[in-house]
Image (tube, coloured by chain):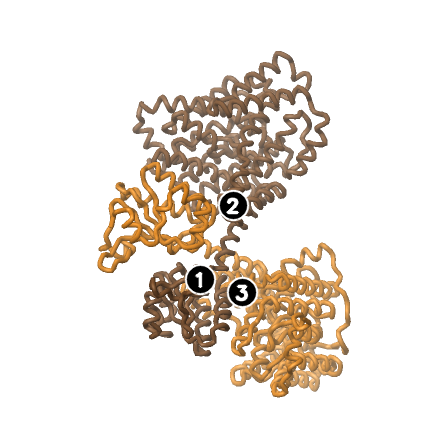
Chain colours: A brown, B orange
Amino acid sequence: MLQKIIPALEWLRNYNREDLKGDLTAGLIVAIMLVPQGMAYAMLAGLPPVVGLYASTLPLIVYVLFGSSRQLAVGPVAMMSLLVFAGVSPLAPPGSEKYVSLVLLLSLMVGVFQFCLGLFRTGFIVNFLSHAVISGFTSAAAILILLSQLHHLFGIPSSGGHSAMTVLKGVIQGMGGFHPATLGIGLASIMILVIFKRKRPNFPAPIIVVAASTLVVYFFGLDQSGVKIVGHVPKGLPSFSIPEWSVESLEVLFPAALTILFIGFMESISIAEWVAAREKYKIDSNRELVGLGLANVTASFFSAYPVTGGFSRTAVNYQAGAKTGLASLITAAVILLTLLLFTSFFYHLPHAVLAAIVAVAVAGLIDVKGARHLLNLRKMDGWTTILTFVATLVLGSEKGIMIGVVFSLFVFIWRSSHPHTAELGYLEGEDVFRNVRRFPEAKLYPEALILRVDASLYFANMAFLEDFLRGRIVEKPDVKWIIMELSGVNDIDAVAVDRLSDIMDNYREQGIQFVFAGMKGPVRDLVSKAGWREKYGKQCEYLSLQHALKGLGLM
Amino acid sequence: MLQKIIPALEWLRNYNREDLKGDLTAGLIVAIMLVPQGMAYAMLAGLPPVVGLYASTLPLIVYVLFGSSRQLAVGPVAMMSLLVFAGVSPLAPPGSEKYVSLVLLLSLMVGVFQFCLGLFRTGFIVNFLSHAVISGFTSAAAILILLSQLHHLFGIPSSGGHSAMTVLKGVIQGMGGFHPATLGIGLASIMILVIFKRKRPNFPAPIIVVAASTLVVYFFGLDQSGVKIVGHVPKGLPSFSIPEWSVESLEVLFPAALTILFIGFMESISIAEWVAAREKYKIDSNRELVGLGLANVTASFFSAYPVTGGFSRTAVNYQAGAKTGLASLITAAVILLTLLLFTSFFYHLPHAVLAAIVAVAVAGLIDVKGARHLLNLRKMDGWTTILTFVATLVLGSEKGIMIGVVFSLFVFIWRSSHPHTAELGYLEGEDVFRNVRRFPEAKLYPEALILRVDASLYFANMAFLEDFLRGRIVEKPDVKWIIMELSGVNDIDAVAVDRLSDIMDNYREQGIQFVFAGMKGPVRDLVSKAGWREKYGKQCEYLSLQHALKGLGLM
């Protein structure tokens, strides 16, 4: 029973000592990655760096207890940080007390929503986020993140804009007044990080850059000559507080909470499933929502900000040998220790280095190849990616992703409302019926119009079918029978049944009868419920076209 | 060439004198219906009654010239009038100068949008209005209209609310102070109208009620004792003016314009197609949009309000013998004559009678049977109707119809994202493959999992397919082959191809190969574009399951 609520009990009770080495190594390596990343991402989210460390402690422990992945490395991630910044910075100046308090409320909302979605087993809704949308959104978000870090790298004041254009304009205007030492530190950090990323991708290079730059700034007193540094990082554990809320702030944060929820969950579930497939265990998406939800509620109670399972850290965790959630517990313990003992080490850490860490982490997310691949495969799916990309850059993350989702669903609906429809003829040699356009030699029957619809029939494509019928009938004045091959009709809705019934009645008045062949189960169920057997006679349904033509005496 | 722009030239040039009698009779009867209806609907729209007469003149002539139906009776209709009232009355007091000017602008917007939609041949979008949505919306709108007329019938002041509840509350609160003579006239009119409707549905009873009540009020001086009357109706033709506009008013009227456009077009096109099917000519939905669009632009320039093809008047027009657009020209001429000569006759016409005409006209639109029918046939389609109905009553027409459209599309997407999937076994006697759940005697192959998906594959249902696969594979540990029967897969998108490719690669690592049977053309095109032939070999595609099993040496 208890194990059903806390799935971690399974591996905790039966912990295999052989796993310890892997868990320990992986936990330590992830912690070493997470210290600089946590601070960098918190800065990206418009929060004091220490908040990123807070977000790397208790939420990890809570996720380990309630989540279903054993290798997922939960914590602050770049995309979520950008979304927090985009959602809250129009409401309060970043870094201000009100800003922090809104972020805590946002975490609570994200957590509660995720928890409820998981509890009511509605995790499937993430399926409606097409990969084409995610790809466009991720590329645009990466560019927005890169742009947002430029002022830290150049050592110029932030222009505070939100869309890609305003931020870029601000940077270009201020670029002349760049701070040489800051830019130098930033570029050097980027170079080191890029080299390590290429040569030794699993080495925690950020900690090297952090240590080296801190020492340089400390010994040369660069902070005195204008290099912006992290400054005082409060010592000790995050304090407990319940976020303040009002109806108004719930309302304004709502769209941001929804976006963060979905994007965060998508990132997390994709990497969790990737690992689980390799380790042959099953991820339960609803349990994942519960785990991440509780982690975010914890984040909001302990001065942190929204977390999720990070793509790159999880990959590192897994490759470094993590077997169970113990790895994440070790990570959290190391971060807690850092908060208790080592925060003063970060006093001289330059902002430019944190910006460099963010920039290098997200640069790889810009996915031009993916968009090109989709465009080659099917134009409309490529356009979904491009539209989401442009909309996210121009209108911001929330509207961008919404436009992408709506467009991708629209593409599907659009295709379904214009189904592939063909008039069929008979190929005597092979005893099959084929599209007369592709097989002009196929035999036609002047008294019968044989046609096939390749789509589920529903309200939005009946007019199309009707037009098609009308067009064909005009060209075949002697038709007495319309024979519809329905094996491609997987489903039908009540409106389509009624409409088809009207069409049949209309043609009947003109002396044309309908006959159906190859009806599938769900369709047969519905038309018999609609009383077709009584109305049109059972003989209007045939197993196959051959049966139908024989039944009508045409073959 | 000219005939392509003005399709009416076709019948005008070749006018058959035999059609004259029918056209003349029908034109006159419709005019006699239209005079009281026009005034009643204008009042329902919150406009002076004469506006309803203006709307029954030039717009009709313009539609006849540019539209494609020969029997459609264009003019003011109840539903559009309600929508005009709902859209404009929150912005200005009904009847005020500002109100009238906003209505003119609204007509212009509706007209221009319709015209453009027609010009760019996008008339198909009405297909996305499911009959299930229209049915729920119509019933709710009829109730809203009935409620809006109650204060006229009781002779009490209007409470001015918009939702069904507030209007009903206002009427109940004011009901005590009802005006006996007004109520008497109203109820008597309703009785007479209902009796005629039942016994002689094509008789223009409203004109009788109008004449009788006007005479009664005039002779007994009932207007002196408090019966509200139409009063002065200006004589003469509508004057030309260009509607005033501002960006702000365009913005606030936008949702109302969209709703009116679609609802108006739906009502019009359904009845036009009904007649055209009986008369064996073709309605061109884009041409209809152009015709109605120009009619509405004309309405806005000549002091009228949005018009469309009315359901009941068109039926009467057709049944009274209308063969060509000449009938509508005669209707317009009679109304023009009325405006020039007879407006003073309507001075003593009581409001209660106009309310009675509206009430009787719309009462028949409440369609409980339709909702029950859909509910019986397929639950979800019935719920679409009920949801649209409730949303329209509670939230108003625009939101109601929008919620209905979104929900109906959601139902379709929902079904497509949970496709019917079956594991198949072989029935040796009949040489066919069938669902093992329905045919437990079907032969299974321990080394092969045979399954069929009955849906187009796209981003939203791939996770479902993946889960299904995972579940089946767990139960069949010896599986070496997954054989997918794809004859029900009408279409596939690029995201699904990529995902399927990932799934195949994942299973391949576990020593399980994929094989496909019965791939349709569009699917084959896409997977070959994605390089499956090179990657997985051509042997992974078989014509049928029999071919596949033989090819794998299992049969």
Q: Residues within 10 Å of mark 1 (few under 14, many from 20)?
A: many
Q: Nearer the viewer, residue B147 or A317?
A: A317
Residue type marked 2: Asn
Residue type marked 1: Leu
Subunit ID for the residue under disc 1 = A
User: Is the same chain shared between marks 2 and 1?
Assistant: yes
Residue B152 against residue B532 in the figure, above or below:
below
> Disc 2 designates what residue?
A376
Q: Is residue B235 left or right of residue A93?
A: right
Asked where in the image residue B344 lies, by quadrant, the reply is bottom right
Subunit ID for the residue under disc 3 = B
**Residue A142 in picture, x, y percent from top left:** 57, 35
> Disc 3 designates what residue?
B137
Local secondary structure at mark 3: helix
Q: CA distance from mark 2 to mark 1?
A: 29 Å
Among the two numbered marks 2 and 1 on one chain, the one whose residue lies closer to the N terminus = 2
